[in-house]
Image (tube, rainbow, N blue to C red):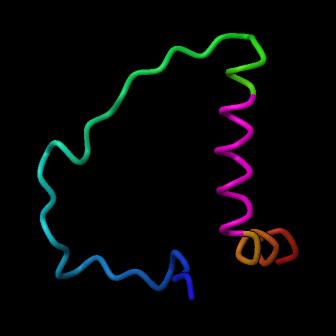
Amino acid sequence: MVKRFKEFMTENRKPRPPSMSQVVLMQFGDDEASMRVMMHAVNRVISRYLVELKKLAYK
């Protein structure tokens, strides 16, 4: 079962090496490939947190 955002505890977190949290710069344009990448990321986030988003929407 996937944990929801509110179920994560911030205490006792394992330190991560800096190489794991590197940010990769990507240039997005107004083309089909950029649109596919962004839509894939957005759909993943929405499907993962759909229940919480619905609760917020109908609050």
In this image, 3 relative to 25: left or right? right
What residue appears at the point 52 percent right and 14 percent down from the top-left corner? 27
What residue appears at the point 74 percent right and 11 percent down from the top-left corner? 30
User: Residue 40 lies in magenta, yes or no?
Assistant: yes
What residue appears at the point 88 percent right and 75 percent down from the top-left corner? 58
Total count of labels? 0
In this image, 16 relative to 40: left or right? left
Kindly give the residue lying farthest to the top in the view shown.
30
Residue stretch in magenta: 36-49
What residue appears at the point 67 percent right and 34 percent down from the top-left corner? 38
Q: Is residue 3 above or below residue 43?
A: below
Q: Is residue 1 above or below residue 31?
A: below
**Residue 44 point in image, percent of width and height:** 67, 55
**Principal SS element in the magenta part?**
helix
Q: In the depicted view, which residue is nearer to us: 10 or 33?
A: 33
Quarter residue 23 falls in: top left
Quarter residue 45 falls in: bottom right
In this image, 52 relative to 1: left or right? right
Q: Is residue 34 above or below residue 2?
A: above
Picture quarter with the C terminus: bottom right
User: Residue 37 lies in magenta, yes or no?
Assistant: yes
Picture quarter with the N terminus: bottom right
